Image (cartoon, rainbow, N blue to C red):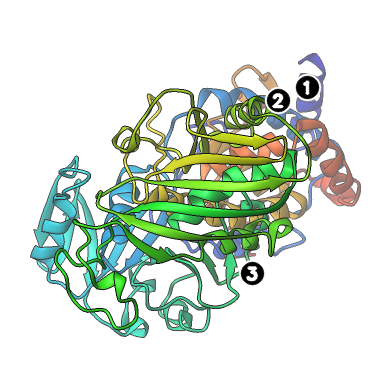
Amino acid sequence: MAGVGAFAAAGALSGAFVAPAGQVQHSEPQMQRTNLRAAGYGSSQAAGVGAMAGLGAVVGLAAAGVAGKRASKGRTSMQAVGVGINGFGRIGRQVARIAMKDPETELKLINASYDADYLAYMMKYDTIHGKYDGTVEVDGDSLVIDGQKVALSHTRDPAEIPFGEHGAEYVCESTGVFLTTEKVQPHLKAGAKKVIFSAPANDDSHTIVMGVNEDTYSPSMEAVSCASCTTNGLAPAVRVLQEKFGIKRGLMTTCHAMTASQPTVDGTSKKDWRGGRAGPGNIIPSSTGAAKAVAKVIPDVKGKLTGMALRVPTIDVSVVDLTVELEKETTYEEICAEMKKRSEGDMKGYLGYTDEALVSTDFETNPISCTFDSKAGIMLDPTFVKVVCWYDNEFRPFVNAFFSMEWGYSCRVVDLIKHMAKEVDEIILLLLLLDSPSLFFLIAAEHTGMIFANIPALSEASHPPDSIVGPVAAIKQVRRPVVVQILEIMPSTAIIVAMAGVGAFSSAGALSGAFVAPAGQV
């Protein structure tokens, strides 16, 4: 810290300025995230930072950032992700409940053909998941949920849905109709930035299963599929088996709870004769593309897996029966040990593990996408094994002491929305760090709650002048958890190296001090 203080002092003497936490003035109007670039990224003058100033300030910031990050855990973000929902069926309703309780998301708009009174009723009550834990009221043609106004629209033409008008940047497409990138172009023209399918895509749109291949997302993708509930319940286990033991081939059967498409008494179904039979009174064989779809998120198993479904007369929770031939010889105990290790490690929150004798209703409150049941699997020989995994095909909430939330399939939809938004903000921040460090300092200080009182050179810094207010307004568009992650993935040494290079190319800044362009002059 002595070294940090020395660098910070030198930086302050040469004109580096970082506003103390709590002293930054905010302008009320929200700015589009793209305005962040206009506020502090586009001007080479605004990026001018002296070598000593930039290095000193960044060392002090990076050091303080670690403490600030730890101290600020559990706080809500400055700007939540604006969420829109098109279609208010089983998944749409659960996504709405999740988005309302997650501090990192804000439900902005619901588009459904029903009137406000009936939408409020559907939001309030659910046979499986119970009454909504909050308040739901009708205000004209809007809902007021937990005191927050949520806009409604009632059109079947996605081009007419006012996503942009209401700030619904990330749209959950849950009608089951618009499942190609081409078909969601009207959503994008109506103001949505990205569209997430709550079902398998009907084209080659990218598919993501959280906990398996979320790192393959690119902000250039306009639409992304969250796959099906069964693919989410299967893929984590397949990933473990493939990475540790290798899969030669396999067959999957899912015993799937009833869905809204099944009749309560015998009806008609020309496409699927069995599907027209009474759901509550039968076990109904059905087709599923879930096993083949796993290859979209784990390419190494392409052509190695297929499967079928049995629709069973329960209303929630399904179970996957996966039988595979492995490439490497092993024991069932080794498979269980690997599943347990991964469930407690890099796949925690998505892959679960149980060694208790449980049944389906025991998983109605389970937050995990795929729970490996060590008591249910069997092995015939060292390369031929059956594994069993449970999953809640809708959702059930679990809230810990820090109010972070994890659920079943519908929660994975919301997780994917947050992941996509985070990736966009990370790119903005990384560019900002390299080209406009002064504004990056302000953003990091604002969102990590840094206090510079223990660094004398910085604690004596002046209150921010009026010229800072414009750029600081852009800070509201960058979410605190993103900055925390930036500080985690870019240790102080890496930031120092990057900023040393910036400072070296900013010799003019060393003479005049760090400079932030006044609002309107960039």
- On the image, which quarter does residue 204 sit in? bottom right
What's under tag 1, amino acid-wise?
Val
Question: Mark 3 to mark 2: distance in Å?
Answer: 34 Å
Q: What count of labels does the image hold?
A: 3
Q: Is residue 184 left or right of residue 137?
A: right
Question: Mark 3 to mark 1: distance in Å?
Answer: 39 Å
The residue labelled by disc 1 is 4
Nearest to N terminus: mark 1 or mark 2: 1
Q: Position of residue 88 (x, y in %)?
A: 26, 65
Q: Is residue 305 above or below residue 77?
A: below
**Nearer to us: label 3 or label 2:** 3
- On the image, which quarter does residue 517 sit in? bottom right
Q: Is residue 123 above or below residue 17?
A: below
Question: Mark 1 to mark 2: distance in Å?
Answer: 8 Å
Q: Is residue 432 above or below residue 72?
A: below
**Nearer to us: label 1 or label 2:** 2
Choose between 69 and 51: the one closer to the eye: 69
Can residue 259 be spotted in the picture? yes
Q: Residue at x 77, y 51 (%)?
A: 434
The residue labelled by disc 3 is 220
Q: Is residue 270 left or right of residue 9?
A: left
The residue labelled by disc 2 is 63
